[in-house]
Structure formats: structure tokens, C-alpha cells
Image (cartoon, helix red, strand yellow):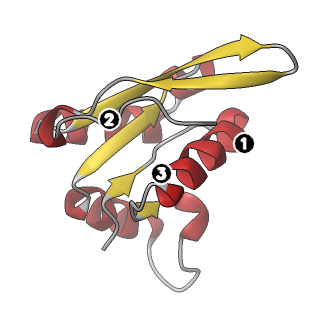
Amino acid sequence: MSEVFIPYARSTAEQAGQISNALRVLGYGVWRDNELPAHRDHAEVIEERLRAARAVVVVWSAEALKSQWVRAEAELTREAWHLGATRLRRRGAGAAVQPHPVRRHGGLGRLPC
């Protein structure tokens, strides 16, 4: 199973991909919902992966705040005490990703995205 689960809204899929790639470069296993198998119930797979993850990094955005999926995933994670969050800031033409530490495992620091 993956070590890190990344919930995000579709509008921030590119940034979620950058976070995912940066974590993989650092040696972490990562899972995002773009890897949902077509033959299984999506809600079941998401909950299974979320519960199995050692850390979760939520990519918060205005759209994510309105998403029942992202909010539910964040709430389940909060209850398990291993919620991390990211703050996206515009820098030049792209966005810089500045994650907050993940409490349970000593933090992931800043990611080079």
C-alpha cells in the first residue's frame, strides 16, 4: 500500500501531480484517485486506500472546500490524527507548493515542486 494519500479537487490536479512526483522522488509511495480501478466501487477503494495510508496531504483550494469527497477524506484523516495540508502560492507563471508538516511521521518538509 501507499504511504501517502493525496485528496484534491480537479482544479488542482496539476499541483497534486507535482506533489505526488516530488514525494516519489523522495522515496514515498503515493496514491491519488487518478489510479482508481474501473472494476471496483470508487468510494470503497478511496476509503480503503485512505485508511491504509500512513499520511495524507490535502491540497486545499476553493473548489476542494466545496467538494464533499475532499472534505470527507480530510475529516476521516483528521479523526485518525495524520492530516497534512498544503498551501498553494502563485510564483511567476506557476504555483509553488508549500506543504505543512505531517504530524505523525516528523514531517515531510518542503517539496521541490
Q: What residue lies at 54% left-to-right and 28% top-to-bottom? A: 64
Q: Mark 1 vs mark 2: give the one in front.
A: 1
Disc 1: which residue: 14
Dot 3 falls on a residue whose secondary structure is: helix
Q: Nearer the viewer, residue 26 or 12?
A: 26
Q: Which residue is mark 3?
A: 23
Disc on res. 74: 2
Residue 85 percent across, percent down from the top left: 38, 27
Cα separation between marks 1 and 2: 19 Å
Spot occupied by residue 30 in the image (x, y as percentages of width and height)? 44, 60
Q: Amino acid at mark 2?
A: Ala
Q: Position of residue 93 (x, y in %)?
A: 88, 20
Residue at left 41%, top 62%?
Answer: 27
Taking the image as drawn, is residue 57 in sight?
Answer: yes
Classify mark 2: residues with Cα within 10 Å, few (<14), some (14-19) or many (20+).
Answer: many
Residue at x-position 75% and y-position 13%: 91
